[in-house]
Amino acid sequence: MRVNLQKAIAKLKNGEVVAIPTETVYGLAADATNDDALRQIYAIKQRPMDNPLIVHIGDSSQVTAWAAEFSPTAQKLAAAFWPGPLTLVLPAKNSVSQIVRANQPTVALRVPAHPLALRLLKESGLALAAPSANKFTQLSPTTPAHVTAGLGEDIAVLDGGACEVGIESTIVSVINNANGDHWQLLRQGMISEAAIERIAGKAATALSQPIKAPGQHALHYSPRTPTRLFTNRGALIAQANTHCAALLIGEGAQPNCPVFKLNKNVADVARQLYDTLHKMDALGADLLLIEAPPNAPEWLAILDRLTRAAS
Ligand code: TXA
Ligand code: MG
């Protein structure tokens, strides 16, 4: 069910969940201070309660309402990349719901760069917990139609069009110790590790006890159809038959099956990736054959999603 901005705000204030657009993927949003509303997110997604949620805020002045520390490196990253596809995992204030942070000592925060999401955050005055609006382990949604196909017609969806970035945010944790603050990359995204390092002014730290993003299950972002990843076009073609469908990145020889071709541009592939996988999944093929992207740093986030899709 589609809802407009005013209806979305009313529902969220009333403790209901609403699927909302962001620049990365659609999120299944609820008031991040309302535990009953947060529980609905986990229930609808069938998500384990030990997998914490990202809290979306309207601007960086709200960080200190959630985080116990907003250290210099975290401030630099926020100034450089917000609004945008970066999530910062920071030490949580005691007041932060144990449900939203799944009993972690930290909280994940992000200012999304989608005009409608920002209006929603600003006009409602709420902070919104929002994981991707898909069932646990399934493909993330980048259009309202994907949300409805995955979660059903009864879910309220605020329509903000197709997502511009197309894959989930880069997640960086920043913690302080006696030697200053340290950052670690918890999830690859379209903001690269090199870009984070440039703004932070220092490399990621290998901590003795790395903080893990608890949601990084190997099986994730998965089509329902069995999926295989190939680092070599020839091997993919050799595997193909008419019951397969193939996703190719760039020009070249084609297999004997339905083909979905993306041009070899990282931002274009990211924007179209989930929509293409949703379409391939709907074909009723026996097997999806996917060509791995080039082996280069700027493709790591895409490779991460495709590796999980095929695991
Ligand atoms: O682009 C995105 O990040 C999208 C949009 C909707 O903002 N959201 C998203 O949420 O991808 P989700 O729940 O699908 O993935 C969030 C990831 C999970 O792997 C979760 O474990 C991790 O963030 N995370 C959340 N809070 C954390 C915390 N306190 N410490 C470590 N990891 C955390
Ligand atoms: Mg997700």
Image (spheres, helix red, strand yellow):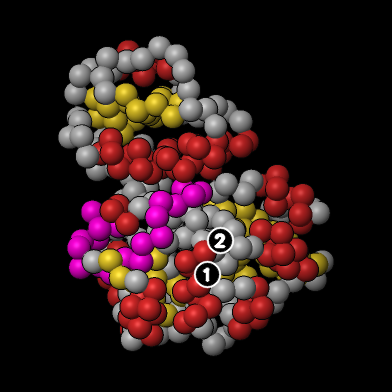
Residue occupied by mark 2: 113
Q: State the residue at coordinates (41%, 51%).
A: 162
Q: Secondary structure at mark 2?
A: loop
In the image, residue 139 above or below residue 20? above
- Real-space Cα separation, disc 1 to disc 2, in angstroms: 7 Å
Q: Is mark 2 within 8 Å of ligand 1?
A: no
Q: Secondary structure at mark 1?
A: helix
* Crowd class of label 2 (few under 14; some 14 to 19; many from 20; radius 10 Å): many
Residue 87 horizontal/vertical position (percent): 57, 62
Magenta range? 147-167
* Crowd class of label 1 (few under 14; some 14 to 19; many from 20; radius 10 Å): many
Residue occupied by mark 1: 118
**Which image quarter: residue 19?**
bottom left
The label on residue 130 is none
Q: Nearer the viewer, residue 105 or 201?
A: 201
Left or right of 86 in this view: 120:
left
In the image, residue 83 above or below residue 94? above
Residue 250 seen in this snapshot? yes
Q: Nearer the viewer, residue 74 or 60?
A: 60
Name the amino acid, label 1: Leu
**Which image quarter: residue 240?**
top left
**Which image quarter: residue 147?**
bottom left
Left or right of 16 in this view: 85:
right
Badge 1 or badge 2: first in the primary sequence: 2
Name the amino acid, label 2: Ala
Q: State the residue at coordinates (23%, 17%).
A: 241
Q: State the residue at coordinates (62%, 73%).
A: 59
Residue 149 in the magenta stretch? The answer is yes
Left or right of 72 in this view: 102:
left
Disc 1 to disc 2: CB gap under 8 Å:
yes
Q: State the residue at coordinates (41%, 47%).
A: 218
